[in-house]
Image: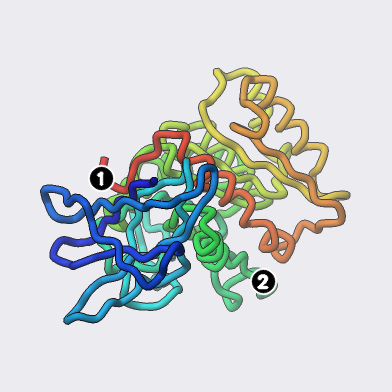
């Protein structure tokens, strides 16, 4: 027996269908005071097993199934869901917009964002924003396709839906912003101006446990700086093929400053992709108290090049490490409500 809470704007008539009998509707057994959260009880879940379910919305006597893959019900999985019934399976990417400090961004908003306005989302900030979504903007025409990675992982019941903010570099200032000492001012701009605006403008969850930053090459260096310097803002940093040791003081700071309560993903190709330098940073983080596999993860990729194509093939890994449901159910990361 598993209780499911379905959050959807008040006034809609919802039921559940599940894999024990897809033709039978399961009615709610409770309703929140404001009418936005319906509670359902699924019977017949095998001990240690699972079943699939899906909400339906009744309109003029017709049941409309929620959009997307079936939900998975099993002990330990989050049981509060935010379905949508209109629109397609894909999210949408905004036009290039200007936020605080004059920085340009594009924002990926997950499927259902515009319909189910009750949901608030964890946020992933990605540096070198031109490489995040579109071939005609990306270096060598090879984007990371972060939007497709997030949609696929959500369909697999592996991660929560995530808002992705692609942060564009200022023209001619990339190296300055991604290395010492320039990344200090860059970090101040993001932590104090950009992040608060994004959370309010696009329903982002507050708290470091819901906020990650990701970058590659020099962007990976900047990502670790952002989390190490402001762990109360950026609780997670993904550092892909990072050029550690080139105009940064991060290794010294990891050894000399109080350990930071962050989670870090590190990776490198081999040979010739800063493998030894990345291992050195990983070893230092572990020596300073970050638990391997829980707080810090390092993966190596034999034969992988220092190139956008290689990064696009493994960008799903830090997303799972940070936002995977198996991790988030053990951490107080918020339930989708403002805080």
Q: Nearer the viewer, mark 1 or mark 2?
A: 1
Nearest the viewer among 58 and 248 is 58
Can you say whether 233 is above or below 310 in the image? Answer: above
Nearest the viewer among 176 and 95 is 95
Image-quadrant location for residue 48: top right
Report how far apart the C-alphas of labels 1 and 2 lie in the structure.
Answer: 36 Å
Q: Position of residue 133 (x, y in %)?
A: 54, 69
Task: Tell me: 330 left or right of 221.
Answer: left
Q: Position of residue 97 (x, y in %)?
A: 37, 66
Residue 338: give its label: 1
Please tell me how many numbered marks the rendered image carries: 2
Task: Tell me: 101 left or right of 294.
Answer: left
Can you say whether 179 is above or below 92 in the image? Answer: above
Q: Position of residue 307 (x, y in %)?
A: 74, 61
Residue at the disc numbered 2:
142
Seen at 40% across and 41% down, the residue is 191
| Mark 1, secondary structure of its residue | loop
């Amino acid at each position: 027996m598993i209780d499911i809470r379905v959050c959807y704007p008040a006034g809609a008539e919802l039921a559940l269908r599940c894999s024990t009998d897809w033709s039978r509707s399961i009615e709610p057994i409770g309703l929140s005071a404001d009418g936005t959260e319906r509670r359902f009880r699924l019977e017949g879940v095998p001990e240690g097993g699972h079943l699939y379910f899906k909400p339906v919305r009744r309109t003029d006597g017709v049941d409309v199934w929620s959009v997307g893959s079936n939900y998975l019900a099993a002990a330990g999985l989050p049981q509060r869901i935010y379905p949508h019934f209109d629109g397609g399976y894909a999210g949408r990417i905004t036009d290039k917009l200007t936020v605080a400090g004059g920085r340009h961004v594009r924002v990926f908003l997950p499927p259902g964002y515009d319909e189910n306005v009750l949901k608030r989302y964890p946020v992933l900030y990605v540096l070198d924003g031109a490489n995040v979504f579109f071939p005609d903007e990306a270096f060598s025409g090879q984007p990371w396709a972060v939007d497709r990675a997030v949609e696929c992982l959500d369909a697999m019941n592996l991660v929560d839906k995530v808002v992705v903010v692609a942060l564009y570099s200022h023209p001619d200032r990339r190296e300055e912003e991604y290395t010492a000492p320039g990344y200090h001012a860059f970090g101040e701009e993001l932590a104090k101006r950009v992040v608060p605006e994004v959370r309010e403008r696009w329903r982002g969850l507050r708290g470091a446990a819901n906020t990650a930053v990701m970058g590659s090459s020099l962007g990976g260096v900047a990502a670790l700086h952002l989390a190490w310097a402001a762990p109360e803002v950026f609780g997670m940093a993904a550092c892909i093929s990072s050029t550690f040791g080139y105009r940064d003081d991060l290794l010294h700071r990891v050894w000399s400053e109080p350990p930071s309560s962050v989670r870090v993903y590190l990776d490198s190709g081999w040979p010739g992709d800063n493998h030894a330098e990345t291992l050195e940073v990983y070893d230092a983080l572990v020596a300073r108290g970050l638990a391997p596999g829980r707080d810090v993860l390092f993966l190596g990729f034999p034969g992988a090049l220092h190139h956008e194509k290689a990064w696009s093939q493994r960008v799903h890994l830090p997303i799972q490490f940070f936002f995977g449901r198996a991790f988030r159910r053990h951490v107080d990361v918020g339930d989708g409500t403002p805080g």
